[in-house]
Image (cartoon, rainbow, N blue to C red):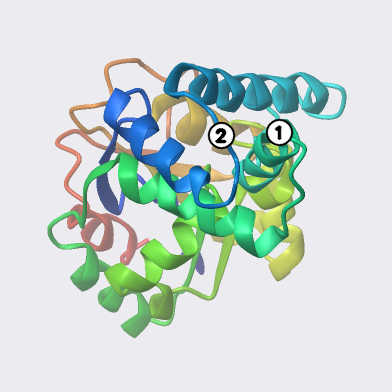
Amino acid sequence: MYKNFIFDLYGTLVDIRTNEYETGVWEKLSETLNFYGVYYNVDELREAYFSSCELQITLGKKKYQYPEVDVVEVFRHIFENKNKKTSKPLATHIAQQFRAFSTQHIRLFDGVTDVLKDLRRAGKKLYILSNAQACFTKPELSKLGLRKYFNGVMYSSDEGCAKPDGMFFSRLTEKYGLNRKDCIYIGNDPVTDVDGARNAKIDCLWLKTDDSDDQPRFAPKYTVPNGDITEVPKLLLKK
């Protein structure tokens, strides 16, 4: 019987749609930066952002197979490119403004709260391991009322690496002292979640959602064909 339930976040618990490529997002961000004496036109700002992301990925590959970007550092670079110094709190604030501008909708999938309550009542410990930016996700977890259900959360932006890197999973099990045999990972992505859990030698339950067009390289321990998260307690609490 599994003691520790480790969840993916976006696409598994949270339904979110963002568009970082929409011109209007960059227009708003450019206007925001103007208040701090940082002047970019829309195309220049967009190019500076994605170039900084690419640079972080390139540097990260020297250490990790699947490196992750830290958007707070990206926005610090955006200031520095214009010879403006900035603090981490200000860079974080600008990053969060970017997230607000680019988010089209965010909500919990139906049944998520009930599933988490059922697992907690059964004495299970719950964790989140997410390819996510901490500065985006921490406030979103609070807004959605999720944080209180979890014993621990780990963000790829804090660790410098991302799923499907087995090292990312290992960081969580080591930090919280978890035995991998007592853990199951639950996610919707066939590569980052299913194959990632296999890389870390952790059992996986695949929520095969509409977004899951690809097939995992490795077969998951369990599959929910319709992606319905309410099936999780039915399948796993009896195990």
Q: Residues within 10 Å of mark 2 (few under 14, many from 20)?
A: some
Residue type marked 2: Tyr
Instruction: Name the residue at 76% across, 60% down.
Output: 174
The residue that label 1 is drawn on is: 82
Give above or below for 121 relative to 62.
Answer: below
- Marks 1 and 2: CB-CB under 8 Å? yes
* Depth order, front residue of 10/201: 10
Q: Kindly identify the residue that appears in the image at 35 percent across and 40 percent down.
A: 28
Q: Nearer the viewer, residue 92 or 153?
A: 92
Q: Can residue 175 be seen?
A: yes
Q: Which numbered disc, 1 or 2, marks the residue that appears first in the sequence?
A: 2
Tell me which amino acid carries mark 1. Answer: Lys
- Residue 129 visible in image: no
- Residue farthest right in this picture: 62
- Residue at image position (74%, 65%) is 175
Which of 85 and 92 lies nearest the eye of the viewer?
A: 85
Q: Quadrant of the C terminus?
A: bottom left
Q: Is residue 100 above or below residue 142?
A: above
Reading the image, the residue beneath label 2 is 39
Using the image as rendered, state which of residue 206 and residue 88 is in the foreground: 88
Q: Secondary structure at mark 1?
A: loop
Who's the residue at 37% across and 62% down the image? Answer: 140
Q: Quadrant of residue 59?
A: top right
- The CA span between labels 1 and 2 is 8 Å
Quarter of the image holding residue 49? top right
Task: Say left or right for 100 vs 193.
Answer: left
Label 1: few (<14), some or many (≥20) within 10 Å? few
Going by the image, does 202 lie left or right of 139? right
